[in-house]
Image (tube, grey):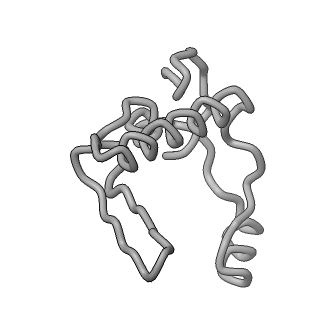
Amino acid sequence: MQTANGNTTTVERKALTEEQVNRFWTDGYLGIGKILEDDEVELLRREYDREFERAYSGHHPRYRSHAVGDTRILQIIQMCEYNIHFRRLLYDDRILD
């Protein structure tokens, strides 16, 4: 499997234990710990910032911009459609499994 930063890794598929399922039904979520490596998170941060810079400069194919007074809010829809590193996350076994 190829990770967001292009490295290859092996992922062992696992099933949830009964305790994990019960914890999910009690708390509404299940903490699973660290999924992405620090360098992958840093790469995604840089790519995220780059896409927003494009949008702020008016060169992004699809974004939403909302303004109230002097405050402007920018939203990029479906980042995975514009950035290969975010697209790879959609198929990353560490997230899917």
Residue situated furthest left in the rendering? 61
Along the line of sight, which residue is nearer the eye, 23 or 45? 45
Name which residue lies at 62% across and 44% down.
14
Could you say where residue 38 lies in the image, as x and y percent from the top left?
Answer: 74, 32
Residue 24 in the image, given as x and y percentages of width and height: 68, 74
Residue 87 in the image: x percent, y percent? Answer: 38, 37
Give the left or right position of residue 2, taking residue 66 as reference: right
Q: How many marks?
A: 0
Image side of residue 49 versus residue 21, left or right: left
89 and 18: which is toward the camera:
89
- Residue most toward the front? 70
User: What residue is drawn where x is 71% and y is 31%?
Assistant: 37
* In the rendered image, the vertical position of residue 77 relative to residue 45, given as above or below: below
**Within the image, what quadrant is residue 13 found in?**
top right
**Which residue lies at the image location 41% right of the left edge and 37% below the top edge?**
91
Q: Residue at x 39, y 62 (%)?
A: 75
In the rendered view, tell whether residue 52 sits above or below residue 67: above
**Is residue 33 placed above or below 46 in the rendered structure?**
below
Instruction: Give above or below for 78 relative to 73.
Output: above
